[in-house]
Amino acid sequence: MTDLFTQWGNFLFHTRNVLFPVLVATMLYLWPPVAIDNVPGIYLMSIGLLMIAVGQGLRILAIGLSYIVRGGRMRRIYAENLVTDGLFSHSRNPLYVGNILIVMGFMFIAGNTVGLIVGSLVFMAIYRLIVHSEEQFLSGKFGDAYTAFCADVPRWLPRIEGLRDTIKNYEFDWPKVAVKEYGTIMTSLMVPLGIIAYKLNVDNKLGDYQALLIGLAVVVMATYGYVRYLKKSGRLKPMR
């Protein structure tokens, strides 16, 4: 019989593409971004931007070195092979670690202390449940091989030892990163721009930066549209 945690993890995995944006939007609504009017607020925003950069960097490394299909099959947890190379030889869940950092980065940029705490705890709990369900599936399918993998590789924080050699030993697949990650990269850029615009508006300073923010948004959306066109037209294909 499937335990309750596994059931919740399966549900969250199945609904994540709709549920997660709704959760982020709800938290930003309940605990709206605050004005950039003091040094702690600037520090929080800087930390948030750094967290997003690190989180997105982890996702790019994971996909460019050795991509693992996280979409499952029919929006259910599924895997044909046990992926243990690339960045997955340093962390069992680098994509999820990246996601958590990105979402927490949004909350840090918003600067609302309650929203930051609640949002971080909620998404860490959500991903822990998803990972629990995936571990149950992978353990049942791959048995001793997965047990050995878990014993050797950390669940969350990447092991730094040997990371440089891992990166050097792979031909980085930039086309795959573009094809698989362009939507997430767009979100990682547009959400902070929107939050910063809101914060500036609260502080009555939006007019001073409006042209810059609009220009950045146009560049991001134009790049997104161009990469999407290349993908759909078949002109941009992964190397492997």
Image (cartoon, helix red, strand yellow):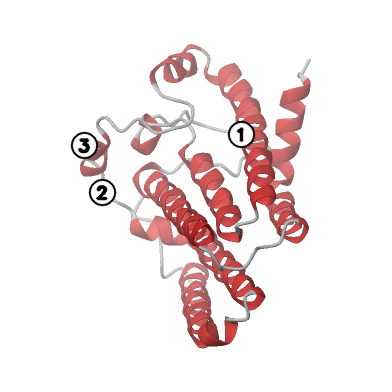
Camera sees residue 73: no
Count of numbered labels shown in the rendering: 3
Q: Helix or strand or loop: what does disc 3 sit on?
A: helix
Say which residue label 2 marks. 171
Task: Report if the CB atoms under discs 3 and 2 are less than 8 Å apart.
Answer: no
Q: Is residue 161 above or below residue 64?
A: above
Q: Nearer the viewer, mark 3 or mark 1?
A: 3
Callout 1 amino acid: Tyr
- The x, y position of residue 22, in whole percent, is 74, 55
Q: Nearer the viewer, mark 3 or mark 2?
A: 3
Residue at 73% x, 56% y: name it: 31
Q: Is residue 188 above or below residue 69?
A: below
- Location of the N terminus by quadrant is top right
Residue at 50% x, 72% y: name it: 224
Front-lying residue, 49 or 172: 49
Q: Helix or strand or loop: what does disc 2 sit on?
A: loop
Q: Is residue 58 above or below residue 30?
A: above
Q: Helix or strand or loop: what does disc 1 sit on?
A: loop
Q: CA distance from mark 3 to mark 2?
A: 12 Å
Q: CA distance from mark 3 to mark 1?
A: 30 Å
Say which residue label 1 marks. 78
Say which residue label 3 marks. 165
